[in-house]
Image (spheres, rainbow, N blue to C red):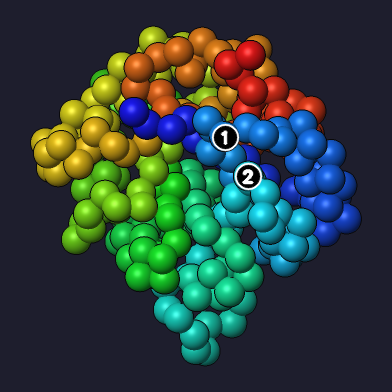
Amino acid sequence: MRTPFIAANWKMHKTVGETEDFIRQFLPLVKGVKDVEILVAPTYTSLAAASKLLQGTNVKLGAQNLFWEDKGAYTGEISAPMLVDIGCSHVIIGHSERRQYFGETEETVNKRISAARKAGLEVIFCVGEVIEQREAGQTNEVLSGQLSGGLKGHDLQGITIAYEPVWAIGTGKTATPEMANETQTFIRNWLKGQYGSDADGVRIQYGGSVKPDNVKDLMAQPEIDGALVGGASLQADSFSKLVLYNG
Ligand code: PGA
């Protein structure tokens, strides 16, 4: 049985003060929730403040990216050991916005995953097709390329996959639950083909315009084990409704 995993990707939103306000409002709303794993991923600048407030709670802390070297002359970058030091247990890697705007490739995704796992961080590894690829019937091919590139040389320990169709991110266009489940079934089968029964324990999140009014239907699908949420995770009230999707 895979524990549902609901994660907030705040992208480039929230100052330190706004992060603290969110956490103070959010914690009481999800107090006592044990059957759902909960994560927030603020910007780097808010990690320290968030870490302090989340200590000893049922909400985990993640970063949105990292650089693969541990330390050195890499101006502007943050390493995996630094994220561990500040209290992160997770990191998001390969988000489509990083692929689109910051030149992320399968090779750099793979290096970041290696660095994260070496430092003991769990990884939310994002994959997904753009609309032209879906319309051209290339979705499965794109996904298997991203999966094999990113996971090269790795086992599945500490890995969650986030399937995020790029055309559904921040657009209000969700993949239908059936469509998302069908693609996630492809991902599961691809993982099984490479890793055998280890693939059964891997959580596959869906991401792309997940909201309080569609989360239940998405989570009812057998291959959707959680959600990676942008817009609807920015308010404590709305994110808590996602965590409490089951009633
Ligand atoms: P969204 O973003 O929920 O705003 O569509 C999801 C994501 O990019 O992780």
List the residue tagged with mark 1. 34
Q: Furthest residue to the bottom?
A: 73
Classify residue 243 by image quadrant: top right
Classify residue 208 by image quadrant: top right
The image quadrant where one finds the C terminus is: top right
Depth order, front residue of 115/94: 115
Residue sitting at 69 percent across and 23 percent down? 241
**In the depicted structure, whether residue 136 falls above or below residue 28:** above
Q: Secondary structure at mark 1?
A: loop
Would the CB of label 2 be found within 8 Å of ligand 1? Answer: no
Looking at the image, do the residues carrying marks 1 and 2 touch, with CB atoms under 8 Å apart?
A: yes
Residue 7: where, in percent of width, then height? 57, 39
Residue 52: where, in percent of width, then height? 74, 63
**Badge 1, how many Cα within 10 Å: few under 14, some, many 20+?**
few
Would the CB of label 1 be found within 8 Å of ligand 1? Answer: no
Q: Amino acid at mark 1?
A: Lys
**In the depicted structure, whether residue 108 falls above or below residue 203:** below
